[in-house]
Image (spheres, rainbow, N blue to C red):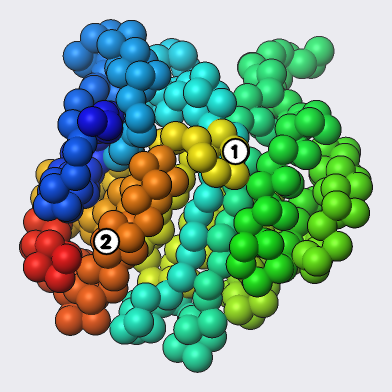
Amino acid sequence: MKTIAILAGDGIGPEVTAEARRILEALNLDITFEEGAIGYAGYVAAGHPLPPATWELAKRADAILFGAVGDPRGDALDRALRPEQAILGLRKQLGLFANLRPATLFPGLEDASALRPEVAREIDMVILRELTGDVYFGEKGLRTTADGKREGYDVMSYNEEEVRRIAVVGFEMAKRRKNKLCSVDKANVLETSQLWRDVVIELSKDYPEVALTHMYVDNAAMQLVRNPGQFDVIVTGNLFGDILSDQASMCAGSIGMLPSASLRAWSGDNGLYEPIHGSAPDIAGQGKANPCATILSAAMLLRHSLDLHDEAARVEAAVSAALKGGARTADLGGTMTTAAMGDAVLAAL
Ligand code: GGG
C-alpha cells in the first residue's frame, strides 16, 4: 500500500487537487491518501505555513500531490511565515532539485494558444528548472545605504555541484527524447551563469550524442514565441525556469495545462507533483479553475514515484480525449466548471 500526501494549500489548490484525487481513486490502485494543511491554510490551522504534522507526512509519504500556496492575507506576515515559504521549504528540505515541466499542445487547443496554430502545434518540450538554489535561497535582506536609502538584496549563487547534478538530469532526459539540450543562462552578464555554462560544457563531453546549445535567457524568451518547435529539453536555473515555464504555458494554451514533477534525481525516486500555476485567489472557490494541470501532475506521480507507466499514460490520454471532445474551462475559452472538467476526464478514463 502506497501513501500519497495531498497538500491542497490555498486558493484554487483544494478545488484542483480534489479533481486529481477523483481520477486517482477511479484507477482502483493500492493507495491511501492523507491530507495535510500547508500555506496560508497551514498558518491558520497550526500557526505555520509548513506545520510539523504536514512536514512529517511529507517525509513519510511515497509521493506528494501539491496544489498551490499563496493568499493575499499572507502578505502582511513576516517573510518566514508567508505561505510561499512552505513550498520553498518542502523543496529544499526534501532535496527536490530537479523540476520537470513538460509543455505540449494538446490536440484541439490551438485556438487557446497565444501563438499561431501552425507554430503552437510544434510545441513539445520539457523545461527542466533547478529548484533548490539561485536567488530564491541566497542571502537576502533589507539594509540602509550610507546615504539613508532602503536597499533590498537577494544573492544569486550556484556551486558547481548544484549545476552538474541538474545538468546530468538534463542530458539524461535529452537522451531519452530527441537528443537536444538547450542550456539557458545569462552568461554575458552574470558570474553565476558563466559558471553554469562552463560546467554544462564540461559535462557535455560525457554525452557526445546530445546536441547541446546555449542561449541567453532574453533570447530564449523571444525564441519561445518565435519558434518553440526548436526546443526539446531546456535546462535552466530556478528564476529563469520559473519565468520561462509560465511563458511556455500560454504558448501551449493556458497556465492551467502545465504539470510538474519535482524530483531528487533523474529516476527511481519519489517526489512532489504540482501544477505550475499558483493559488489564483481571484477565482478561488468559484469552480472556475482548470484542474488539468493537477490531473496531469497526478499522471507524472504515477509514472515517476509509483512506476505505474500504463496508468500514467491512461490518465494523460483521458485528458487528451476530454479536450478533443470539447471540454473547456474558462481559461481555454469554455464555460465548464472545475468539477465538470474533472467529470469529462473521468468519463474518458
Ligand atoms: N503550484 C505552484 C505554487 O503554489 N506556486 C506558488 C509559489 O509561490 N511558487 C513559488 C515557486 O514556484 O517558485
- Inspect this view and state whether residue 136 appears: no
Callout 2 amino acid: Val
Helix, strand or loop for disc 1: loop
* 226 left or right of 274 in image: right
Q: Residue at x 35, y 82 (%)?
A: 107
Q: Nearer the viewer, residue 163 or 246?
A: 163
Report the residue marked by disc 1.
265
The count of marks equals: 2
Of the numbered discs 1 and 2, the one sitting upstream in the chain is 1
| Residue depicted at 47% across the width and 17% down the height | 79
**Mark 1 touches mark 2? (CB < 8 Å):** no
**Which of the pair 64/120 is nearer the observer?**
64
Rendered residue at 73%/62% (across/down) = 182
- Horizontal placement of 183 versus 127: left or right? right
Label disc, if present, on residue 315 of the rendered structure: 2
In percent of width and height, residue 341 lies at 14, 63
Q: Residues within 10 Å of mark 1 (few under 14, many from 20)?
A: some
Q: Is residue 263 visible?
A: yes
Q: Residue farthest to the bottom?
A: 118
Label 1 CB-ligand 1 distance < 8 A: no
